[in-house]
Amino acid sequence: MNEASRVVLGIIGPPASGKGAISTYLASVYGAGKLRFSDTLHAILERLNIERTRDNLIILSEVIRERCGEDVLARAMMIGAEQAPQQIIVIDGVRRAGDIELFRSMPGFHLIAVDADIHTRYERAKLRAEKPEEATQTFNDFAALEQRSTEVTCHELISQAEITFDNNGTMEDLRGKIDEYLRSLGVQK
């Protein structure tokens, strides 16, 4: 692939829908570069010795966006994508309309979505326990996440994606759908 055929995939989806699973698969099988919005926030919290809970990530994101501009994290992701040496770049965790608007200016950008039933996502979140509170949260706590500032527009923005992957099945099912979509873009394993 040359620069003109570079593929940049922005992934949007609610918590525990499979964004990370897609990113990891694309990195391991296709050699994709992987950027996550939350990595910058995690690094800041770690440096400040603050627990990396979902609440702390949301608060930090809101403060940074309020003080430095709504698109500050998207601009950082865009710079990271432009500097990455890989021909396929995955931007995990797109959540805002302004982010999508900015990314659409990038050559080769495609917005993809992943979604799953809330009960499936809840069980996956408990199993992965990526954030400290996930292993012990109740279903009601998990469902309340949908009303947080970082998630409230997610389902609306999913409708802007070129394709939405239903992730209620197995990982093998999801991988097959991803492979098929990438073939439609001219990308081979």
Image (spheres, grey):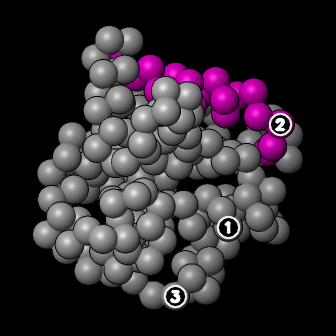
User: How dense is the environment of label 3, judged by Cα within 10 Å: few (below 14), some, or many (20 and up)?
Assistant: few
Q: Circle 2 — which element? A: loop
Q: Is residue 175 above or below residue 130?
A: below
The residue where tag 3 is placed is 170
Is tag 1's residue or tag 2's residue first in the polypeptide sequence?
Answer: 1
Q: Quadrant of residue 142?
A: bottom left
Is tag 2's residue or tag 3's residue first in the polypeptide sequence?
Answer: 2
The residue where tag 1 is placed is 25
Magenta segment: 69-87
Q: What residue is shown at x 37% (from left), y 20% (from top)?
A: 64
Q: What residue is shown at x 62% (from left), y 81% (from top)?
A: 176
Which kind of residue does numbered mark 1 sit on? Answer: Tyr
Distance of label 1 from label 2 (alpha carbons): 18 Å
Distance of label 3 from label 1 (alpha carbons): 13 Å
Task: Tell which of 97 and 119 is nearer to you.
Answer: 119
The residue where tag 2 is placed is 85
Q: Is residue 178 above or below residue 109?
A: below
Task: Tell which of 79 and 104 is nearer to you.
Answer: 79
Q: Is residue 87 above or below residue 134?
A: above
User: How dense is the environment of label 2, judged by Cα within 10 Å: few (below 14), some, or many (20 and up)?
Assistant: few
Q: What residue is shown at x 64% (from left), y 24% (from top)?
A: 79
Which kind of residue does numbered mark 3 sit on? Answer: Thr
Q: Is 85 colored magenta in this rendering?
A: yes
Q: Is residue 185 visible?
A: yes
**Along the horizontal axis of the image, is 34 left or right of 74?**
right
Which kind of residue does numbered mark 2 sit on? Answer: Pro
Q: Quadrant of residue 174?
A: bottom right
Task: Tell which of 111 and 119 is nearer to you.
Answer: 119
